[in-house]
Amino acid sequence: MKNIIEVKSLSKIFPGKITAVNKISFSVKQGEIFGFLGPNGAGKSTTIMMLTTLHLPSSGTAFVSGYEIKKSPRSVRMQFGYVSQDLAVDDRLTGYENLFLQAKYYHIPNQTARERIKILLNLVELEKRAKDLVETYSGGMRKRLDIACGLIHRPKILFLDEPTLGLDIHTRRQIWQYITDLREKQGITIFLTTHYMDEADSLCDRIAIIDHGVIKVLGTPQELKSRLGGDIITLDIALTHVAKIPRLIKLLKTLTNIKQIKTAKTKITIVTLHAESMMADILKIIQKNSIPLEMVMLKTPSLDDVFLNFTGRSLRDEAGNREQAHKARRMLRRIRS
Amino acid sequence: MKVNYFISDIFYVCLRDLKHYLKQRVRIMATLIQPIIWLVLIGNLMSGLTANPLTLKFLDAPSYLDFMAPGVMVMTTLFTGLFAGVRVVWDRRLEILQKMLSTPLSRTAIPLGKIAAAVVQGNIQVIIVLLTALMLGVTFKTGLAGIMVILIFISLFCSIMASISIALSVNIRNMETFFALMNFITMPLMLTSKAMFPVEAMPGWLKFIAEWNPISYAVIPLRTLVTKGWDWTVIWQSLIILCFFALCFLAGAVFFFKRARA
C-alpha cells in the first residue's frame, strides 16, 4: 500500500531548548488507522501540529499526501481534516452554522455545502439538533459535530487528537464506530492520538509509542504485544503429583510454538505465541497422564504492558482525569508561547 | 479566483464575529445605554455648568452637548475597536483559532475579517449615539451628507484601534492580561485628548499631548462636521492622516498575527 504520510527526521525545539520532538521518522499507509500513543508531554500533539502546518518544524520534514509541509502548507491543508482534543466548536452558533462556516473556509460552493452538511448531519446523527445552539449540546454531541466539521471537505486524512477524551463509555463506542465506518466506507486514513489502551488496541491497525519526543516502538498491536514474548499460561499441579512434573515438561516441550517453560514448586509457566490454540493441546497432555490440576491461568499481555515496558510508565496513571490533562497542556502552552 | 477566495475568507471571518455579536443581547443593551448615560447625564450636567459666554468661547460650539457628541462617538469606537483582540484571545483559548488555521483560510484574511467585524460594530454603535444626540437636540450642521462622512472617519479610526488590539492580542494567552492592558491604554488616551474637554482650557503640557494624541485626529473633523460645517481643509487633512495610519496599522496587525505561533 502507498504511504500517505511520510515523516523524515522531524524535530521541534521550543525556545528554552525544550526538545518536544526529536528527529522522528515514520510513515502512515493509505487507508489505515494509525495510533499515536504516549504520556502527556511526550510530543504527540506537537507532532500533529507540525503535520497540520500549525507549527513549523525546527528541522526535518514531512510529506502529507505528497505535499511538503513547509513548501506547500496550503495544499497540505486541503488534504486533511483536523479535530483537536478540545471541543473546538463554536458554541454561540448552531450546529448548522458551524458546518456552513467550516465549508466556506474550504471555499466549497453554497449548494454543495448544503448537500454535504445534510449528509454529515445524518452521519453523526445530529440532524434533529442542527438548528439549536451548540451551547445546548452534550459533550458527545459536540465531539460528533467537531468530527463532522473535519470531514466537510472530504479529506484524505483525518487527524483526531484524543477523540474520546472525557466521554462516557457509550459515546466512546459510538465514536469508534464512526471512525471504523469512515475507514471502511470512505477509505479515509485516520491518524489518532489516545490515552485509552483499549481504544488503541481495538481501533488501530498500527501503533507508534512516543516518549520524550522519540518513537520507542512501532507496529501492529499484535506485534507489539508479542515483542513482550507472547502469552503466558500458568499451570498449578496438585502437590501429590509433583513427581510427575519433569516428565510433563518433557512432553510439553514436544509441542510447537512453545517459547519458554519455567517451573517453580508446583507451578509451571509457559510462554507461547498462540495461547488460545495451545491451551487445548496442553490440557490434552495433562489429561492423558492423569495429572490433577489445581489451577490454570492464561494471561495475554495488554497494550498497557507494552506501554509500561517501553516508557516505564503505566498509561492508566497518565490518563488521569480531564482536568489533569488540561493542566499539563496549559503548562506546555505556556512554554510554547 | 485567488482574489475571490481572499474576499470570501474576509467575509466569512467577519460574518462569524458579527453572528457572535448579534447573539450577545446583554452587550448590545449595554452599548445602547452607554451613550445615553454619557450624553444625558454628563452632557446635560456639563451643559448647565458651561452655559456662560466664557466657556462657550472655549468650546466654540452652541452647547457642551454639541461639543461632546463627537467625543462620545469617538470614545465608543475606541472601545469597540480595542476590544477586537478579545476575539483572538478567546478563539485561541477555545482552540477555534487553531482549527481555522488548519484550513486553507488565508492567514491575512483572519485579522482583516476580525477588523472588518469591529468596524461594522463601531458603525452600528455610532449610529445609536447619533440618534441619541439628535433626540437630545444636537444639531448636525452638515446634515445627512455630513453623517455619511462621519461614518467614514469612524470606520478608519475603528480599524486603527482594532489593528492595535489585534497586534497586541496575538501573544496574550489569557483574558485578564488583555483587559488590564486595554484599560491601561484607553483611559489615559481618552482623557489626554480633545474628545471631552476643550484644548483651550488645558494647561500647556496637556495641550501638547492632546495635540499629538491620535484620538484628536478623529475628534476634530467630527466636531467640525457637527458644529461648524464643511471646512474642507480640516476634513481632507484628517482624512489623509487617518487613511495613512489605518493602512500602516492594518499592515502591522497582519504582520504580527502571521508571525504569532499557533
Image (cartoon, rainbow, N blue to C red):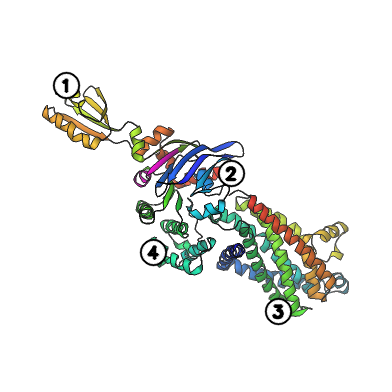
Residue A236 disc label: none
Q: Position of residue A298 (x, y in %)?
A: 25, 35
Tell me which chain the residue with mark 1 is part of. A
Give the secondary structure at mark 3.
Answer: helix
Marks 2/1: CA–CA distance = 64 Å
Give the secondary structure at mark 2.
Answer: helix
Q: Quadrant of the N terminus of chain B?
A: bottom right
Give the secondary structure at mark 1.
Answer: helix
The magenta region covers A198-209
Looking at the picture, which amino acid does disc 2 mark? Arg
The residue indicated by pointer 4 is A122
| Crowd class of label 2 (few under 14; some 14 to 19; many from 20; radius 10 Å) | some
Q: Nearer the viewer, mark 4 or mark 2?
A: 4
Residue B183 in the figure: left or right of residue B241: left
The residue indicated by pointer 1 is A247
Residue at the (18%, 33%) spot, across then down: A281
Q: Position of residue B82 (x, y in %)?
A: 68, 59
Q: Position of residue A124 (x, y in %)?
A: 39, 60
Marks 2/3: CA–CA distance = 53 Å
| Crowd class of label 4 (few under 14; some 14 to 19; many from 20; radius 10 Å) | few
Residue B135 disc label: 3
Marks 1/4: CA–CA distance = 64 Å
Marks 3/1: CA–CA distance = 108 Å
